[in-house]
Amino acid sequence: MKLSVIGCGYLGAVHAASMAQLGHDVVGIDTDTAKVELLAAGRVPFHEPGFEELLQSSLASGRLRFSPDMAQAAGSKVHFVCVGTPQKRGEYAADLRYVESATESLIEVLAPGELVVGKSTVPVGTAARLAELVTGKAPGALLAWNPEFLREGFAVQDTLHPDRLVYGLPAGADGDTARALLDEVYASIEADGTPQVVTDYATAEMVKTAANSFLATKISFINAMAELCEATGADVKQLADAIGYDDRIGRKFLNAGLGFGGGCLPKDIRAFMARAGELGADQALTFLREVDNINMRRRIRMVELAREVCDGSLLGKRIAVLGAAFKPDSDDIRDSPALNVAAQLQLQGATVRVTDPAAGDNIRRSWPQLDVVDSAEEAAERADAVLVLTEWKQFRELDPVAFGRVVARKAVLDGRQALDRDVWEAAGWSYRALGRRA
Ligand code: UGA
């Protein structure tokens, strides 16, 4: 089947290569010519385990190509819209300009019988509006909404083996036509027994924002418990283990620590609140404001803890920050809790050295005021405190004995429950973590 994928960022690039892997003939379109050239050469402009191999094998099959020219999308039976929906500057709402302009330029090349499939995370109501635009300006073309649930770091696995497929379709016979095309696109994934939810536009759009809101709430719930643990002397890790044994609760996404960041959860809960407000249903989501507040408080608490460990003042203290990406196996520093903490420490007079296995170049570009070094040892040289703020394997596996030789003071703050406390304490380190006993 001939497919086009509009927008070759994280979502689009992985989607395009994965669809080619499923046997389709795919063209990925992006206005950023530098990105198009890199991808066409089999090089990946971001860090994602397993993606380079997938990209290169899809290119080698001859079924995948990239172009900056929207005209190349002409003739594809299905067109996926995979562009970003960032948070508007200074507002909670999502910025839909990329989705709108991608759809408008796609309309120019659409032919009757073709299907536009939205994959971007959008405020509920967007699909219905875009469907009117598509059917109004390109008679005979249809629109469906098919949200994407991939996680960074697991993007390939999540695209090829998703937990579920959600199809938001127009009503009536048009819905049947759109469904048949989506069934053809995802035939092999459907054949694996992947659950399908076939529904209307609004539900499909909301599935995505509801899922991300639930995940954010789960993280903030355990981080609220961490605050209480700090007040009472209880241990949040044991608490999470114990409540997580209940299947109805589950242990996943109950890792207390520095909280959530990245390009999705923070902006999605804010856009959801903004949309609820527009719909007159803001009361239903006021709890998400608290979810956001709890999350942001963890960063402040981490800075306080660092100050405590540095005898009450950060001025002139040397601090090593291990980890800057919003999570391991990613070089994404959008809304990075770690960098937020690093910047606050620096503002309070500390000399901060940051290291990250993948995000170094991104930090140098976006945070030029921060001192970025290439290894944990270099970051920790003569440090008064070491902060582990992203739980990369490299940091989890540090040898506390050897590592202890480079620092001035063996004080470690574990912002992600990444380290084995007993082992570090046995090596003479003082160990502190959010939500855990001193
Ligand atoms: C998230 C969702 O998990 C995906 O399902 C969704 O498709 C994606 O957003 C999206 O909307 O595109 P992602 O942003 O890649 O995926 O990252 P997550 O694995 O959800 O982690 C988000 C943040 O929560 C990270 O900063 C992580 O460190 C933090 N986190 C996660 C915790 O603090 N504690 C946990 O227990 C789990």
Image (cartoon, rainbow, N blue to C red):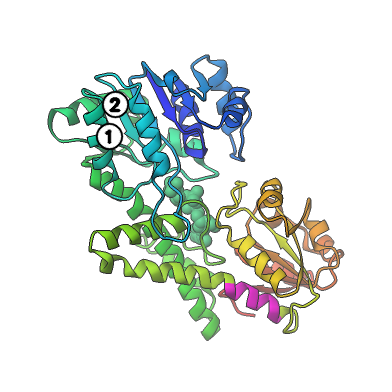
The residue sitting at 28% across, 66% down in the picture is 282
The residue sitting at 74% across, 77% down in the picture is 314
Residue 167 against residue 259 in the figure, above or below: above
The residue sitting at 33% across, 20% down in the picture is 77
In the foreground, 380 or 10: 10
The answer as to whether callout 1 falls within 8 Å of ligand 1 is: no
Picture mark count: 2
Residue 260 horizontal/vertical position (percent): 51, 60
Residue 242 in view in this figure: no
**Quadrant (top left, top right, bottom left, bottom right) of the C terminus:** bottom right
In the foreground, 136 or 204: 136
The answer as to whether callout 2 falls within 8 Å of ligand 1 is: no
**Quadrant (top left, top right, bottom left, bottom right) of the N terminus:** top left
Q: Which residue is mark 2?
A: 115
Residue 377 against residue 197 in the figure, above or below: below
Gap in Å between the C-alphas at discs 2 and 1? Answer: 7 Å
Look at the image and give the residue range highlighted in magenta.
300-308
Q: Of callouts 2 and 1, which one flags the residue occurring earlier in the amino acid sequence?
A: 2
Q: Amino acid at mark 1?
A: Ala
- Are there few (<14), some (14-19), or many (20+) residues within 10 Å of tag 2? many
Residue 114 horizontal/vertical position (percent): 28, 22
Residue 299 against residue 46 in the figure, above or below: below
The residue sitting at 64% across, 74% down in the picture is 303
Q: Which residue is mark 1?
A: 144
Residue 233 horizontal/vertical position (percent): 55, 83
Residue 104 in view in this figure: yes
Question: Are discs 2 and 1 less than 8 Å apart at CB?
Answer: yes
Q: Is residue 395 left or right of residue 215?
A: right
In the foreground, 138 or 75: 138
Tell me the tag on residue 366.
none
The quarter of the displayed image where residue 190 is located: top left
Q: Secondary structure at mark 2?
A: strand
